[in-house]
Amino acid sequence: MSSKGAKAGASGKAKKPTKPGAEDKREDVLQAVIIADSFQTRFRPFTLEKPRCLLPLANTPLLEYTLEFLAMNGVQEVFIYASSFQEQIESYIRQSRWTPIARSCPFSTVDFIRVSDARSIGDFLRDLDKRGLIESDFILVHGDLVSNISLDGALAAHRARKEANRDSIMTMVLREGGEDEHRAKVNGISPVFAVDPQAKRCLHYEEMNPLQSDHHVELDSDMLKQPELEIRADLIDAQIDICTPDVLALWSESFDYELPRANYLHGVLKDYELNGKMIHTEIVSDGYAARATNFQMYEAIGRDVLDGWTHPFTPDSNLIKKHTYQLRDNNVYREDEVTINDGCDISNAALGQDTAVGLESSIENSIIGRNCKIGKGVVIKDSIIWEDVTIDDYAVVEHSIIAEFSTVGKNSQVSSGCLLGSGVVVGDGIAVAKSSIISVLSAMGTSATPNTELLGPRGKGTLFIDPDIEDMGEDDPERLQLSLGYSLEGYELYASSVSTLASGDEEVLSDDEARDTVRSGRTTSFASDDSSTAGASNFVTEAVLGLLEVLRGESGDFDSEKLEFTSLRLANDASDSAVRRAVATALVRRAVELINAESGGMETSKAAKCVLTERKGAKEFVSEVGVGGDSVPEQVDFILAVQRACVSISRVIEVQKAGALCSALFQQMYSEDILEEEGILKWWEDARAKEGGEAMEQVREKCKALVDWLEEAEEEDSDEESDED
Amino acid sequence: MAPPKGGYAPTLDKFLDTLKGRPLEASIESLVSLLKRRQIQGSEPCALATAHILLQVVVMDKYTDVNQLLARIQGVARRLVAAQPRELVIGNIVRRVLGLIRDEALENRNEVGSDESISSPSMFNLLADPDTTPPMWSTGASPAPGSGVSTPMADPQSTDVKALRSEVIDGIEEIMDEIRQVDEQVQAYSDIIIHPGDYILVHQPCKTVQRFLTRSKRKCTVFLVVDPSAEDPYASFRKSMAATGSVVVNIMNTGLMAYMSRVNKVILSARAIMSTGGVLVDGGASVIARAARELGRTVIVIGGVYKLSPDNQIDQETATEWGNPSKCVNYSDGRMVRQVTVKTAVSEYVPAELVSTYITNLGAHSRDHLHAIVNDHYKEADSEFDLYGTIRK
């Protein structure tokens, strides 16, 4: 068999830790590795005291679903990797039916591997390679996986491929997700797979997010030599991988890889020439697979469980011993000993044991844990409530997650998007604002002083502030992963033309996406400009991107850019104001790039200078194309455009900073003779400079110093003149 | 080097293979989780699995008298039933085995029969209803009806237990044989039912019904109501029907009424048959029964005697098992998934009045006759034994 060589190498390494004599029968033993640590803090504040894999999903810890999935597929040996909360996970397993000592455990071994200094999933897998516990194909999954996909087909296909060519090292099991929006697709990140549909080989992988400035994927031109190529952004990737031990060897070779997809998969595919390893896909259209990677997914999977998509892993299968769920009318899963008083309206919900619901309460689309006390006239909608929670009379809870031992007082209101950590008490008659995150613990894990102003006199907990999030850039795509609700509101969205490989359905899909983002980008950034027709807007976005490239020095020079710009302008029949807007936006955006640059940001004044002087011909371009003439009204128009661009960029940087940048740009342009003092002063007096909201005013205000200085200079000039007289 | 045949995922066959080498408790747990995960489903596999595990209990468990054995079996039964509460066959097999044990114990008693302590309960039982108070129970303690709890017999004799054990083992093996032979025995009646030129409508026919139809060499037309989403599992059936010159027409549930006027007979495969005549069928069959009734067509239900259940608390709600909605709607349809709650019934209840005739391996029966067969096969104490606990409350 062709795979023998690899086998021998692997088992040679493995000799020490495994029992002697065990090797010969190992081939038919299926091994699995669970990564039970995410190295993320997305589930804070809930994960301050508990690992993600033990969070209850439909009243059953996530890890249970993962283990059931493995048991269902006949896995016999399980290795669980965890670093933080490793003891908690271990003691949970020890007390559950999964401990190998218990007769109920379908696995022959469940081993914990502790890596104390691991800082990423990559560290785990490199450690696994060193240990040599894995001798044959294994399944790699994460501890937050919910799936009922049968892997038999994928395993057989993987094996056949491996026997045909031992460089086929991995098979990813992906679920078709349709072209429409889907709640089980991760919002804010779209994985893009380039797949050869015949060989099922994955050729390229990339993750895209709505906040990135270019909405396209660059493919190696060699890829086009494939007779057939599918570019798919519709797949639900629950990261179920069937791997050979060679996968681990590759992890070891690349010590800097951290993430299995964004780093490893992307890297290995890119370096195919170097390593010669192939990764395949198994795209299934049956079954369920999703990972609770963020709050939105956590919520979506909870709903899928209630709706039965994860069948047989639904509450009424009572996977955990002593669970006693039954499915009743209105799609309500109810355990024994649940008290429901008269007049209650409950639909599409799960209720845990010993939970009592008072008179005339209404519960809809919600999951409620064990031993909860729900008072009279309570309204609970679209929410997830864990164990031992008290919701007092006439309280309203909407689209929120409430952790164990929390209390919501009488007549209180918990609005959409709230996360209440464990032990939080919301006093009587309090309205908790939308999307509040409240916890009794601070991000450091110490107890925080109760904010009685916010939560009432008997309140416990305070607004939770995660320093990591504070540090995050405004347009870091990670931000999209944090809240319970998903919205792109308030983000600066860039639009660009879509990949030059536009063909096929998937491309049409991403085209649609791009168009959507253009639309929202347009309304937020240029709402003040009345002339923004569709064509002009298209022109602006394309022109800005072209200009940015030249400004960055990535392509071309200003001579050729001027030509292109003009032809673009003619093609789109763009107005003078659109041209000015494009030039102004490009300048401001480039300056912000320089200020925010990772390798040491620049001062605003230096950035402004840099933008105009860094590239040869920039000055002339701005003066000729941007301003377009020497007349004062034209200058005023251009200054206005710069001001507006600064205002719209204030979504990315602070308003004050945007103002400073605006002022710096003006000054720079003045000293480079692009603008004249008369133009700036006219602008200062122009009514349009003050219109359009507070931000305009603030940015304008920042330029006062410059204007004052100009005025003084003018006076001096005239003084001098008069002196000479 | 090769992976296990048929993949790694556990199945009924693999489960049965491992039975011998494993501790009893591990086997029970493994069966419970297989049932919960629906990796064993359908009445025949469930019946066989139940019979096998009860056989293991009888063989491997330690007990000193028959009451201990009964209690033990009842304990295991509750766990199995809770794992798939809507598969009534599990309860049927359990009750058959319990009845079997009681019978064998009684026989043993009578053979040994000189002991005073035994004759006195027998005397007591002469006055009491022999079915509600099994002879093995000692006097004085009157067990709560249906609780299954009983007072252990004083000083049991080990020879009794040994003899009992081998008798019960034989009995359970007979039950297994019975389950396996159902198809063959049922076929024998096909010539009575199927006549040349008949138009017969079947809904997702199980093996039993398929063989019933192919056995009769008479030319007929079969309308096959199939699940449109699933792959066609009926290729061999179609082939063997064609061999006899019969015609098989695939139809969908939606076009049902159009064909119904043409149909002479509707044949449904039962998942379980109640003594009252109600039938548990695959999801989608009950609408066929109703349609047939509307037009006055004959509805024939086929199923082995082991599917006949003494359970009489079944109604539409307790009988309906909800399955995976992806049978009807693909999960990749994001908008449907978000906005619509899709429910697919795996099993449904057909009320007695919609069924004309029942055919089991014992022959054709009318509704009134079913009661007698149930009484033949189950002891009243076992029929009343509450397997469900809180499940049906």
Image: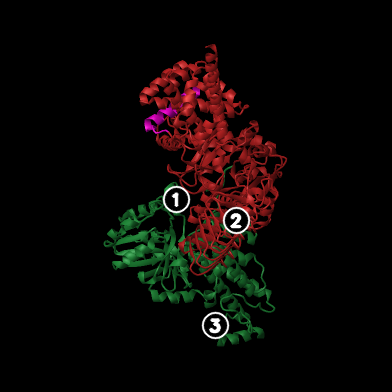
> In the image, which residues are magenta?
A529-549
Q: Colour of chain B?
A: green
Residue underneath mark 2: B18
* Residue A119, position as x, y percentages in the image: 67, 38
Residue situated in front as seen by the camera: A369 or A79 = A369
> Which mark is first along the chain, 3 or 2?
2
Q: The numbered mark 1 sits on a residue in which chain?
A: B
Element at label 1: helix
Which label sits on residue B337? 1
Q: The numbered mark 2 sits on a residue in which chain?
A: B
Q: The numbered mark 3 sits on a residue in which chain?
A: B
Q: Amino acid at mark 1?
A: Val
Residue underneath mark 3: B130
Q: Amino acid at mark 2?
A: Thr
Residues behind callouts 2 and 1 on a single chain: yes
Residue situated in front as seen by the camera: A466 or A581 = A581
Q: Colour of chain A?
A: red
